[in-house]
Amino acid sequence: MKHALFPLNTVLFPGSILPLQIFEQRYLTLIKDCMKQQSGFISVLISEGKEVGTTPQIYCTGCYVEIIDWESLPNGLLGISIQAKYRAHLSESSVRDDGLLFAEVSPIKSTLDNNPALPDTLKPLSETLKQLLNHPFAKQYEDKIDFNNTADICYRLSELLPISNKEKQLLLETETTEQMQDLLVLHINNLQS
């Protein structure tokens, strides 16, 4: 199925919530269409280029997001909050005349979707996440994380760890629970040393 893309300098994971200010006409049209059709769009990390202006180069994996809130901001811009629902692989991208990107979208099926139990050896992942939740930048997730849900722990850690967008993108692209957990442990160990 074809979806509109919203290139960002941020990597979203399922469950991520992000406020955005919309001012470019192509994205105002996108948001209007999504609200009219009660559908979402795909957020995707920019690999080269900028969020504003010419159409940037993007990665081939993003997240399907839905608009969960909107408001007119004091500066006259449209403010929306989006929430990521599931990871998606993109193919056959095209650019409309107004610069809006579209692509064929396939949901990514992963062993993480089966909600496996977090093995005892990886309990430190949930402890690290609990520590991150004490920081102001993570307040929006306070009391919203299911610590019995491996996917929830992995996705929030991937989002909140202070690592580069390229490293976050690699986490987004993992195919198995084990791959994601191994990468998270590696990043945490690197940050601690």
Image (cartoon, grey):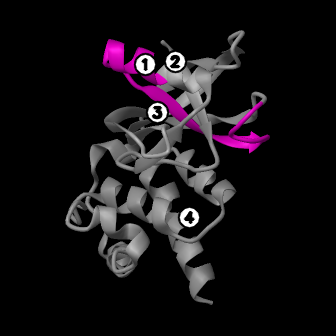
Residue 183 numbered tag: 4
Say which residue label 2 marks. 29
Q: Answer yes or no: do the residues labelled 2 and 1 have beta carbons within 8 Å? A: yes
Question: Which residue is more in the foreground, 60 or 175?
Answer: 60
14 left or right of 167? left
Residues at marks 1 and 3, CA–CA distance in whole angstroms: 27 Å
Say which residue label 3 marks. 108
24 left or right of 99? left
Percent coordinates x, y for residue 23 in the rendering: 57, 33
Q: Answer yes or no: do the residues labelled 4 and 3 have beta carbons within 8 Å? A: no
**Residue 54: quadrant of the picture:** top right
Callout 4, which amino acid? Leu
* Mark closer to the chain start, 4 or 3: 3
Residue 168 numbered tag: none
Residues at marks 2 and 1, CA–CA distance in whole angstroms: 5 Å
Residues at marks 4 and 1, CA–CA distance in whole angstroms: 38 Å
Q: Answer yes or no: do the residues labelled 2 and 3 have beta carbons within 8 Å? A: no
Asked if the stretch drawn in magenta spans residue 43, the answer is: yes
Which mark lies nearer to you, 4 or 2?
Answer: 2
